[in-house]
Image: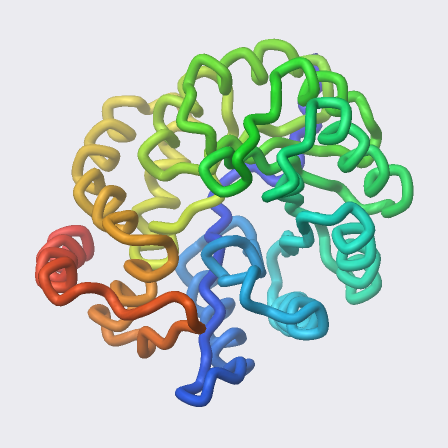
C-alpha cells in the first residue's frame, strides 16, 4: 500500500473578504492566510464554496488564488470547478499558471451529467493540466452524487490526487477509502461533523469551514485522529458539535462570515444574492462561537 498521500491534514476553505462596495478586499485575503497559517493549518483552499466562488468572475477567481499563492507558506488548493467543462479547464490552466499546488474541482452542477459525463469532465482536466487535482463530491450543491465506481476509476490517473467527501454518506466515504488504498489518493472530509468518522475509516483530514473560526481546535482534532488518539478526537468533536451545526444554520458561507465578525476578525460582508444572517440565528451563533472559542 502506498504511503504517498498528498494534501493530508487541516485545510480551511477560506472566506473571500469584500469591501462594502462589493469589491474584493485583497489585503483581507492575505490577512486570512497569515492568520490561519499562524494557527497551524496544513494548507489553504481558496475559491471554494466558502469563498463565494460562484459570485466571482473568472478574472477575480484567478486574482484571489494568485494572492493566496503569493502570501502562503503552506500548500494552496484553488477551487476551479464549473458547470461547463471548458470553463473549468480554462480556470484550472490559469490557476496552474499562477503556481497553485492543487486544484479542487466540484463536479459539473446544474447540468446533471450522467456518470460517463462526470468521468469525462475530470479526465479532460487531468489530461491537460499537470497539477494534482481533488474530486469534489457535493451532491447538495451539484444535484448529482459521484458514484464510487467513477471515483475509483479516476483515482488511477496520475494527476488525480484526492477526493473531498461532502455527500454526508459515511458508507460511501468508507468504500472510496477501501477501494483506493493502493493509489496515491487522499480522501478528505468535506463536512466538519464527519471528520471524525471519515478519519476513523482511513480519511486523512478535512477541508473545513469551522477551521476559519477555531483553526487551532480543528487542527488539534485532525492531528489527534492522525495519531490514533480517538479519545481526544471525540472530546474535541463533541465540544465543537454545536459550532459545526451553527455554521450551517443558513447557507454557507453566511454563518461563517458572521462568526468571524463575532470574533472581531472581520466584517461579514457578502455578495448578493447571499444576505445577512437572521437576527435570531445571529444570537444563537454568538453563544455557540463564544463556547467553541473558550
Residue 271 higher or lower than 50, as above or below: below
Residue 237 higher or lower than 173, as above or below: below
Would residue 254 appear left or right of 292 to someone viewing this image?
A: right
Q: Which residue is at the front of the view, 278 or 123? A: 278
Q: Which residue is at the front of the view, 154 or 118? A: 118
Residue 1 higher or lower than 129, as above or below: above
How many labels sit on residues?
Answer: 0
Give coordinates of residue 293: x percent, y percent: 19, 56
Task: Please give the name of the residue rendered at 28% of the width and 53% of the height, measured from the top-left corner.
Answer: 250
Q: Which residue is at the front of the view, 97 or 231? A: 97
Task: Please give the name of the residue rendered at 23% of the width and 69% of the height, measured from the top-left corner.
Answer: 263
Quadrant of the snapshot with the C terminus:
bottom left
Would residue 55 appear left or right of 35 to someone viewing this image?
A: right
Give coordinates of residue 197: x percent, y percent: 36, 22
Q: Which residue is situated farthest in the right direction here? A: 128
Quarter of the rendering containing residue 94: bottom right
Give coordinates of residue 115: x percent, y percent: 70, 23
Would residue 123 appear left or right of 218 to someone viewing this image?
A: right
Q: Which residue is at the front of the view, 188 or 252? A: 252
Give coordinates of residue 253: x percent, y percent: 38, 58
Would residue 7 appear left or right of 23 to someone viewing this image?
A: right
Q: Which residue is situated farthest in the front direction here? A: 111
Quadrant of the snapshot with the N terminus:
top right
Task: Please give the name of the residue rendered at 25% of the width and 29% of the height, measured from the top-left corner.
Answer: 232
Task: Please give the name of the residue rendered at 35% of the width and 27% of the height, measured from the top-left corner.
Answer: 196
Quarter of the rendering containing residue 5: top right
Residue 13 higher or lower than 228, as above or below: below
Amino acid at each position: 500500500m502506498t504511503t504517498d498521500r498528498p494534501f493530508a491534514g487541516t485545510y480551511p476553505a477560506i472566506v473571500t473578504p469584500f469591501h462594502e462596495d462589493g469589491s474584493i478586499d485583497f489585503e483581507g485575503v492575505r490577512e486570512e492566510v497569515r492568520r490561519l497559517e499562524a494557527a497551524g493549518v496544513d494548507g489553504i483552499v481558496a475559491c471554494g464554496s466558502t469563498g463565494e466562488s460562484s459570485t466571482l468572475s473568472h478574472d477575480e477567481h484567478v486574482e484571489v488564488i494568485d494572492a493566496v499563492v503569493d502570501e502562503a507558506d503552506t500548500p494552496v488548493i484553488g477551487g476551479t470547478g464549473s458547470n461547463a467543462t471548458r470553463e473549468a479547464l480554462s480556470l484550472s490552466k490559469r490557476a496552474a499558471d499562477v503556481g497553485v499546488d492543487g486544484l479542487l474541482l466540484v463536479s459539473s452542477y446544474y447540468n446533471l451529467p450522467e456518470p460517463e459525463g462526470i468521468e469525462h469532465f475530470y479526465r479532460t482536466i487531468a489530461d491537460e493540466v499537470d497539477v494534482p487535482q481533488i474530486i469534489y463530491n457535493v451532491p447538495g450543491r451539484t444535484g448529482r452524487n459521484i458514484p464510487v465506481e467513477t471515483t475509483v476509476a479516476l483515482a488511477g490517473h496520475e494527476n488525480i490526487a484526492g477526493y473531498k467527501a461532502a455527500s454526508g454518506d459515511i458508507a460511501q466515504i468508507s468504500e472510496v477509502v477501501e477501494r483506493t488504498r493502493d493509489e496515491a489518493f487522499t480522501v478528505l472530509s468535506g463536512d466538519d461533523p464527519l471528520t471524525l468518522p471519515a478519519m476513523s475509516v482511513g480519511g486523512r483530514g478535512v477541508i473545513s469551514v469551522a477551521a476559519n473560526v477555531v483553526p487551532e481546535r480543528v487542527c488539534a482534532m485532525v492531528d489527534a485522529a492522525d495519531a490514533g488518539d480517538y479519545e481526544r478526537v471525540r472530546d474535541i468533536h463533541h465540544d465543537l458539535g454545536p459550532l459545526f451545526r451553527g455554521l450551517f444554520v443558513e447557507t454557507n458561507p453566511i454563518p461563517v462570515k458572521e462568526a468571524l465578525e463575532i470574533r472581531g476578525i472581520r466584517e461579514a460582508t457578502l455578495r448578493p444574492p447571499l444576505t445577512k444572517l437572521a437576527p435570531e440565528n445571529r444570537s444563537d451563533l454568538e453563544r455557540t462561537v463564544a463556547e467553541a472559542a473558550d
